[in-house]
Image (cartoon, grey):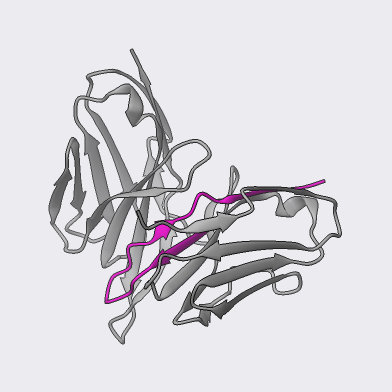
Amino acid sequence: GQQLNQSPQSMFIQEGEDVSMNCTSSSIFNTWLWYKQDPGEGPVLLIALYKAGELTSNGRLTAQFGITRKDSFLNISASIPSDVGIYFCAGQLKSRAGTASKLTFGTGTRLQVTL
Amino acid sequence: DARVTQTPRHKVTEMGQEVTMRCQPILGHNTVFWYRQTMMQGLELLAYFRNRAPLDDSGMPKDRFSAEMPDATLATLKIQPSEPRDSAVYFCASGLVLGVSEAFFGQGTRLTVV
């Protein structure tokens, strides 16, 4: 099935550093979502973006909906050890009826934070 | 604290056996998704339901997989017969669709078929 491309695939950073990751698609989306998955758990929603150009923050996390509607970015400031995990982007289209369609997930970015 | 509940959390079964995975969506949510996660393929959508009706199950191998929602509080995913390549983590997610869908995931069922 279709997947969104995320980069980087993985990254090692030191505690306190800022982190940036992005997600690109060949198709446009109406909604972008960012999830975090911890080992042995399901993905947990971090941020939802509904409008091209939108910039939304959730604590140390900031995400942007690209103006082309084909990409999105997630930034984590001042990383801490509990930021470790896999970050997934997900895109969604609306149907003609205006209702939401299925989510398409990115390939994930694995983040590891060293002390 | 509302959450999606999946059972069992882990399942080991022999090839050829039937497997049933269950999901209790968040009360009031009208959309249920089944995803499969593997290292190679990532998160793949198998099927999703809205108001208990299947909307899209194109991601599901029809010959062995079936998904149902007997009522609003229970979704099931069955594999019969199971094969080793079905080994994966299966996630259920639910959402309330009013133009957008913020899907909330369960903890998953880790299936191992030997």
Residue furthest out toward the bottom: A97
- Seen from this angle, which residue lies furthest front? B1
Total marks drawn?
0
Q: Quadrant of residue B61?
A: bottom right
Q: Is residue A12 above or below residue B61?
A: above
Q: Please report the bounds of the magenta region as a residue range.
A: B92-114
Q: Is residue A106 left or right of residue B62?
A: left
Q: Nearer the viewer, residue A2 or B73?
A: B73
Looking at the image, is A96 positioned above or below residue A108? below
- Furthest residue toward top: A115
- Residue B98: image x %, image y %? 27, 76
Kindly identify the residue that appears in the image at 86 percent across and 59 percent down.
B16
Which residue is pictured at 56% across the width and 70% down the height? Answer: B75
- The question of residue A57 being in magenta is answered with no
Q: Is B37 left or right of A94, judged from the image as shown?
A: right
Q: In which quadrant will I find the C terminus of chain A? A: top left
- The percent position of residue B54, horizontal first and vertical second, equals 53, 81
Image x and y of residue B50, in percent: 44, 79
Taking B60 as reference, is B12 left or right?
right
| Left or right relative to B28: residue B99 | left
Residue at (32% x, 62% y) in the render: B102
Q: Position of residue A113 (x, y in %)?
A: 36, 21
Quarter location, residue A14:
top left
Viewer-proximal residue, B89 or B71?
B71
Quadrant of the snapshot with the N terminus of chain A: bottom right
In the image, what residue occupies the spot 33% across and 68% down? B101
